[in-house]
Amino acid sequence: MRDNSYLKNRLYFLWRNYFPDVLAKEPIEIRFGRKAKYRFGSIRYCHASKKVHITVNGRFQDEKYPTEIIDHTVAHEMVHYAQGFPTPGPRLSRYPHRGGVVNRELKERHLHHLVYFYDSWVKGYINSL
Ligand SMILES: [Zn+2]
């Protein structure tokens, strides 16, 4: 079973290699959350702790789920962060998913392989539910 330190390693790997221009304005915590069917990840700002929390679907602790799916989920949330979500302050876009802005930025950051992997994997996943 994967644990939260596994997630932390994936976050730092992706950050170092694909988001080097993105500065951490506040600490980012990442952990597995509850098991969900359709919600793979989320990012939110906690006013009390002044930290950003990325939560990844608890299902993905199981190693039968490919690493690429975890990387895609983490990178997706990192794009939100890079685009000004969910931190207080100026936002680049009010509607984070409009016009496929997340996928566009993933591709601009040379993460096409994760987008394509996800697109083909998710069909089989939905059918398996
Ligand atoms: Zn999103």
Image (cartoon, rainbow, N blue to C red):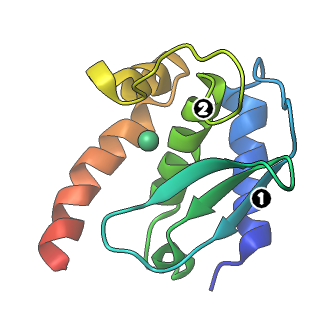
Q: Nearer the viewer, residue 125 or 35?
A: 35
Question: Which residue does the numbered mark 2 point to in the structure image?
Answer: 85
In the image, residue 94 lies at what x, y percent?
45, 21
Amino acid type for the residue under numbered disc 2: Phe
In the picture as drawn, the residue positioned furthest to the bottom comes out as 1
In the image, residue 129 lies at what x, y percent?
19, 79
At mark 1, the secondary structure is helix
Above or below: residue 95 compared with residue 63: above
Above or below: residue 81 compared with residue 104: below
At mark 2, the secondary structure is loop
Residue at point 66% right, 15% down?
Answer: 90
Distance between mark 1 and mark 2 Cα atoms? 19 Å
Q: Which mark is residue 8?
A: 1
Ligand 1 falls in quadrant? top left
In the image, residue 19 lies at what x, y percent?
70, 26
Q: Are marks 1 and 2 in contact (CB under 8 Å)?
A: no
Q: Is ligand 1 closer than 8 angstroms to the Cβ of mark 1?
A: no
Above or below: residue 25 compared with residue 34: above
Above or below: residue 33 compared with residue 78: below
| Image quadrant in which you'd find residue 101 | top left
Mark before the other along the chain sequence, 1 or 2:
1
Horizontal relation, residue 117 to residue 34: left or right: left
